[in-house]
Image (tube, grey):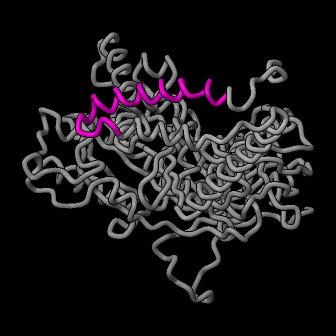
């Protein structure tokens, strides 16, 4: 304000200000006239009051001081308001429970389309984006794929219409925050599906009602069966079976088709270990049209269904609680550099806070937590079942591998190369014999490692398992080999140290699958880990 030194006296300044006020009043007046012709004089009176009430301008230095103090006050207020709103957001987040939902099922059952529709219905995707995807799908002559583009983000997936990576997205209902994990259905990408399902609390098994598609997925070699078995093994306790594509011209919301699929699935789910009455919920939907997803469908569409919609079922579902005060266990699924080392994973037990000192096992690296992100938001702490990104100091990115576990210093996770396991043989390859020396790929939480069966300890006869009196039990010889369907306790050996726990202590870190040549041959649980230090 260089001209302040030659500023006119207050009276002159006042006089100079008057026309400006009048102009402003005049503009306002004309606007008012346009809006409300009955009160033309009010703004003018107001302007006269403003003129009369205007105090003489203070000297220029005082003006500067007042302005600067006002600015600083405004900044402080804004900062305080911002902090308060941040705290409110944090509090709000804490009141909602968090669940991870994995979409599984045979290739082309409509998993990505159903996931995309959920995001659209819950307001995570706007109309403009949908229109863009519709146009893109039309250009590829695949009009019905546009909803899947929300979940399938890379070009390869869009071109072939097959999910490859596990898609990840977030949405909220009134009571719950959900993370959607969209698993690939194709048999070539089952290892990716395993990594997705191992992070989930609930499974949504998507089945296509279209003639021929359900049968293909359900028959021998179909992914519907394999995905159910893997989901159960990987700890997905609750399953929602959504029978999709009910709007299809070959189905037309037919109750006969729905009942046929349900009657075939129930015995299979039971044999996979699910309690069908308690843990499984069947429902018809249309993923493409969004029918029976956010709101219950009209009787005019489907007269025989009077059950809840998908959002209602997801909101009501009960999952076992994990211990927020237990020892920290977070299997690392990925890592990257971002002004420090950032690791991604799901907290299986305990609570991680900013400033915590933790161990990265099995390398026994001491690290410090310098930041935690949850759904792209920074938080000060995160509890069990949360999918988080944790920024660490004290370790380089190249010193971490997928399968390592972030654990508490006081009670670290064990690292072993051998352990005893109880295995159920599902389906061996045609010419294979399950015996000592059998090799396969071991999938346990985020670890993928080659393993060898070094010893068959005991075969368990499930029919005579109820015989509890040890005197009546005959001591059995060690089996030399076992066939399909057998349950066996055996010793498993791996080349590198892996972090695992007894199934009885930490179920999430004690379940595993054995796969070979693209097929799941056995599922199992860790029954004995050698004590630390052995």
Above or below — where is 37 with respect to 506? above
Image location of residue 334, percent across then percent down: 70, 38
Image location of residue 500, percent across then percent down: 74, 57
Image quadrant in which you'd find residue 489: bottom right
Above or below — where is 499 with respect to 152? below
Residue beneath the point at 22% across and 54% down: 296
* Count of marks, rendered view: 0
Image quadrant in which you'd find residue 277: bottom left
Above or below — where is 315 with respect to 83? below
447 left or right, relative to 460: right
Residue 519 at least partly seen: yes
103 left or right, relative to 58: left
Residue 403 at least partly seen: no
275 left or right, relative to 300: right
Where are the magenta residues, as a range?
13-41
Residue beneath the point at 51% across and 48% down: 179
């Amino acid at each position: 304000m260089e001209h302040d030194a030659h500023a006119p006296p207050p009276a002159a300044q006042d006089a100079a200000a008057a026309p400006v006020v009048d102009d402003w009043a005049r503009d306002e007046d004309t606007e008012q006239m346009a809006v409300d012709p009955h009160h033309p004089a009010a703004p003018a009176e107001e302007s006269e009051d403003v003129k009369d009430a205007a105090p003489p301008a203070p000297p220029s230095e005082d003006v500067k001081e007042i302005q600067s103090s006002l600015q600083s006050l405004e900044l402080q207020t804004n900062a305080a308001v911002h902090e308060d709103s941040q705290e409110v957001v944090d509090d709000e987040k804490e009141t909602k429970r968090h669940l991870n939902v994995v979409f599984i099922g045979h290739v082309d059952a409509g998993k990505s389309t159903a996931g995309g529709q959920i995001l659209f219905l819950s307001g995570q995707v706007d109309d403009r984006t949908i229109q863009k995807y519709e146009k893109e799908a039309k250009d590829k002559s695949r009009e019905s794929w546009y909803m899947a583009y929300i979940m399938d983000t890379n070009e390869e997936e869009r071109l072939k219409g097959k999910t490859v990576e596990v898609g990840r997205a977030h949405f909220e209902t009134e009571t719950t925050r959900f993370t959607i994990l969209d698993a690939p259905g194709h048999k070539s990408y089952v290892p990716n599906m395993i990594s997705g399902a191992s992070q989930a609390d609930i499974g949504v098994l998507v089945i296509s009602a279209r003639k021929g598609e359900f049968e293909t997925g359900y028959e021998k070699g179909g992914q519907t069966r394999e995905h159910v078995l893997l989901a159960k093994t990987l700890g997905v306790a609750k399953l929602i079976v959504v029978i999709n594509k009910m709007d299809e011209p070959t189905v037309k919301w037919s109750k006969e088709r729905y009942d046929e699929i349900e009657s075939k699935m129930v015995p299979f789910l039971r044999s996979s270990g699910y309690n069908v009455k308690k843990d499984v919920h069947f429902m018809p939907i249309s993923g493409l049209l969004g029918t029976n997803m956010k709101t219950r469908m009209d009787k005019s569409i489907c007269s025989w269904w009077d059950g809840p919609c998908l959002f209602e079922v997801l909101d009501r579902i009960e999952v076992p609680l994990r211990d927020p005060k237990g020892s920290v266990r977070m299997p690392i699924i990925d890592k990257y550099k971002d002004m420090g080392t950032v690791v991604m994973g799901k907290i299986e037990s305990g609570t991680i806070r900013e400033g915590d000192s933790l161990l990265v096992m099995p390398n026994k690296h001491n690290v410090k937590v310098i930041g935690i992100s949850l759904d792209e938001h920074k938080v000060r702490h995160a509890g069990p079942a949360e999918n988080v990104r944790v920024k660490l100091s004290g370790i380089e990115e190249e010193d971490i591998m997928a399968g390592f576990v972030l654990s508490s210093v006081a009670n670290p996770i064990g690292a072993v190369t051998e352990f005893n396991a109880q295995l159920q043989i599902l389906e061996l390859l045609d010419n294979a014999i399950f015996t000592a020396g059998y090799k396969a790929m071991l999938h346990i939480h985020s670890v993928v490692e080659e393993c060898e069966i070094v010893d068959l300890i005991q075969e368990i006869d499930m029919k005579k398992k109820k015989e509890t009196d040890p005197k009546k039990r005959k001591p059995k010889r060690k089996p030399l080999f076992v066939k399909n369907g057998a349950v066996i306790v055996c010793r498993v050996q791996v080349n590198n140290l892996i972090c695992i726990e007894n199934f009885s202590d930490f179920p999430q870190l004690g379940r595993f699958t054995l796969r070979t040549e693209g097929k799941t041959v056995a599922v199992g649980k860790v029954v004995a880990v050698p004590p630390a230090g052995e």
